[in-house]
Amino acid sequence: RKEVEQDPGPFNVPEGATVAFNCTYSNSASQSFFWYRQDCRKEPKLLMSVYSSGNEDGRFTAQLNRASQYISLLIRDSKLSDSATYLCVVYNNDMRFGAGTRLTVKP
Amino acid sequence: EAQVTQNPRYLITVTGKKLTVTCSQNMNHEYMSWYRQDPGLGLRQIYYSMNVEVTDKGDVPEGYKVSRKEKRNFPLILESPSPNQTSLYFCASSLLVAGALFSYNEQFFGPGTRLTVL
């Protein structure tokens, strides 16, 4: 079983849609959680950290459920520029990356 | 501009021909790391370094070597490349706090090196 698992997608949504990505992790001792964004053929970049109480950054909301070892990312009012692969990242003495969920937002 | 640079960006080589991929960062970060990214597998760590002259194996170190003689540079060496090392490689750097990879510190990635071994 992979340490960090994500639905690979792809998710194809129209502009303005709300889309949610899920991620599960296997190590219950994991300490910190992140979402990174990776555009096609580019390097990953930090989108947001995920805090225990949940956190929001504009149209993006991240949630953490430690009991279920589950992380989510919600994107509201999708834009064309949101098209990318979203990587779930879990930290436990080192960074563990999920394989990513690909999102395409269409006009 | 704060950045991580890698060279070359693209490389096609043949089995057994030694190669080096350079990585350099200008942010004075102590921590540097190499990853490979393959479809369906995500980023997997090859080697990492907590500081000058301190390196350690990641998840997939076989067939790779690294060195950290200076804080800013962390080259990846493939002594005898094989086709299963065809991949997209990323170098990354991050701050350390109190000697440890601070859990909320962002990792900054280089632009990637696409390597093909024939």
Image (tube, coloured by chain):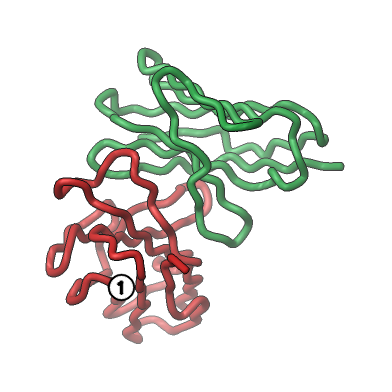
Chain colours: A green, B red
- Position above or below: A21 against B39: above
Query: Would you identify the image quadrant in which residue A96 lies?
Result: top left
Q: Quick check: B30 left or right of B84?
A: left
Q: Quick check: A9 left or right of B44?
A: right
- The quarter of the image holding the C terminus of chain A is top right
Q: Mark 1 points at which residue?
A: B76
Q: Quick check: A105 left or right of B20?
A: right
Q: Callout 1: residue from which chain?
A: B
Q: Where is residue A82 in the image (x, y as percent from the top left)?
A: 69, 43
Q: The residue under label 1 is which amino acid type?
A: Leu
Residue at 30% from the left image edge and 79% from the top image edge: B80
Outermost residue on the left side: it is: B53
Q: Position of residue A43 (x, y in %)?
A: 51, 59
- Position above or below: A48 against A42: above
Query: Would you identify the image quadrant in which residue A18 lies?
Result: top right
Residue at 19% from the left image edge and 57% from the top image edge: B50
Outermost residue on the right side: it is: A107
Outermost residue on the front side: it is: B1
Question: Badge 1: few (under 14), some or many (20 or more) residues near its Cα, within 10 Å?
Answer: many
Q: Quick one: A4 or B39, which is closer to the camera?
A: A4
